[in-house]
């Protein structure tokens, strides 16, 4: 039978539609596994890869420095709880915390480094957390505060800042400690303040006798002095610094809910069984409950 042109045209169009439908089915079969991989949750991806990538600050003893520290050991313990190994992504602190979170948590550095799955030593502060909407902060594991370490032979007691009119005090630059000392009592101590690149360098100056005291975060002082009997560590005699305390915890991408839940459970277990306290004691730090 001879088909009319109209019938032949309809048949041709049907054949083309069938061919494209078949091609679409084949393409869907190819793409579906890829789409499924993209839909894996943050925790599922980590377990699939067998690696938990953890962002750790450089030059931040006793928490994370030269491949060791409280946060390094804690990160390894967290990875073990997830059944994977820990891979450290070391980074230098940027100008502010927002830069650190952008580079290491939710976006990655413009040079192609990061982001990590989780960042250690993140501030757990409600006001700050409300402003950073791309990051989930959780699992507080330690409470930090400022303190003063002093040489007992030079400063047997410390009830005020007055001795620092004559005696040198070390601080890390661009910190609250430096700001307070520069402005305290109308700037009376400006001439005796010695500024260092890190708290660790300030602690070394204290050990050598270059300064009589150092003001820094208490954990840094405890780890740096490691029970040195020549020294004492006290809370600073200043109302602002006495009140300024903050919990430290973890940070992940906002959408990494299942990862955050798993890490929260892991932190809870490490605190409950004393593992976290033991980790901190190994590095000379007293664990302070958040």
Image (cartoon, grey):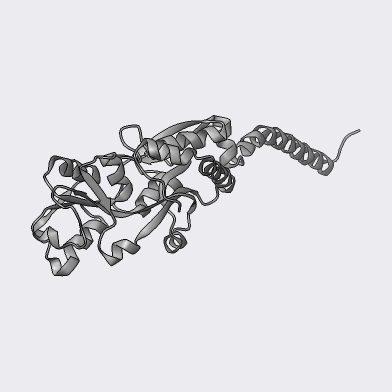
Q: Residue at x 58, y 31 (%)?
A: 48
Return the x and y of residue 207 as percentages of the image width and height: 17, 41
Image quarter hosting the N terminus: top right
| Closer-to-camera residue (166/217) | 166
Q: Residue at x 32, y 62 (%)?
A: 242
Left or right, 84 with respect to 288, comes to: right
Q: Residue at x 37, y 43 (%)?
A: 109
Residue 96 shows in this picture = yes
Return the x and y of residue 243 as percentages of the image width and height: 34, 63
Return the x and y of residue 161 as percentages of the image width and height: 18, 62
Left or right, 171 with respect to 290, comes to: left
Residue 113 shows in this picture = no
* Quarter of image, res 90: top left
Q: Residue at x 14, y 63 (%)?
A: 162
| Closer-to-camera residue (32/106) | 106
Left or right, 54 with respect to 47, comes to: left
* Quarter of image, res 24: top right
């Amino acid at each position: 039978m001879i088909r009319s042109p109209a019938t032949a045209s309809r048949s041709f169009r049907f054949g083309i539609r069938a061919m494209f439908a078949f091609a679409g089915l084949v393409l869907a079969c190819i793409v579906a596994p890829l789409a499924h991989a993209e839909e894996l949750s943050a925790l599922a991806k980590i377990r699939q890869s067998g690696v938990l990538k953890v962002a750790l600050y450089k030059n931040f003893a006793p928490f994370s420095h030269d491949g060791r520290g409280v946060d390094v050991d804690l990160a390894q313990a967290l990875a073990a709880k997830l059944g994977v190994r820990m891979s450290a992504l070391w980074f230098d602190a940027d100008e502010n915390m927002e830069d650190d979170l952008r580079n290491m948590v939710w976006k990655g550095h413009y040079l192609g480094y990061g982001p990590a799955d989780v960042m250690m030593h993140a501030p757990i502060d409600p006001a700050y957390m409300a402003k950073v909407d791309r990051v989930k902060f959780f699992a507080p594991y330690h409470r930090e505060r400022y303190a003063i370490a002093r040489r007992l032979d030079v400063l047997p007691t410390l009830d005020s800042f007055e001795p620092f009119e004559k005696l040198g005090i070390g601080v890390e630059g661009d910190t609250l400690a430096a700001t307070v000392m520069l402005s305290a009592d109308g700037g009376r101590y400006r001439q005796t303040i010695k500024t260092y690149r890190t708290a660790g360098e300030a602690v070394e100056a204290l050990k050598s006798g270059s300064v009589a005291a150092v003001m820094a975060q208490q954990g840094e002082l405890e780890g740096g002095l490691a029970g040195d009997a020549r020294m004492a560590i006290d809370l600073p005699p200043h109302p602002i610094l006495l009140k300024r305390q903050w919990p430290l915890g973890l940070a992940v991408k906002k959408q990494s809910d299942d990862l955050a839940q798993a890490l929260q459970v892991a932190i809870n277990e490490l605190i409950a069984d004393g593992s976290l306290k033991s980790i901190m004691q190994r590095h000379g730090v007293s664990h302070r409950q958040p």
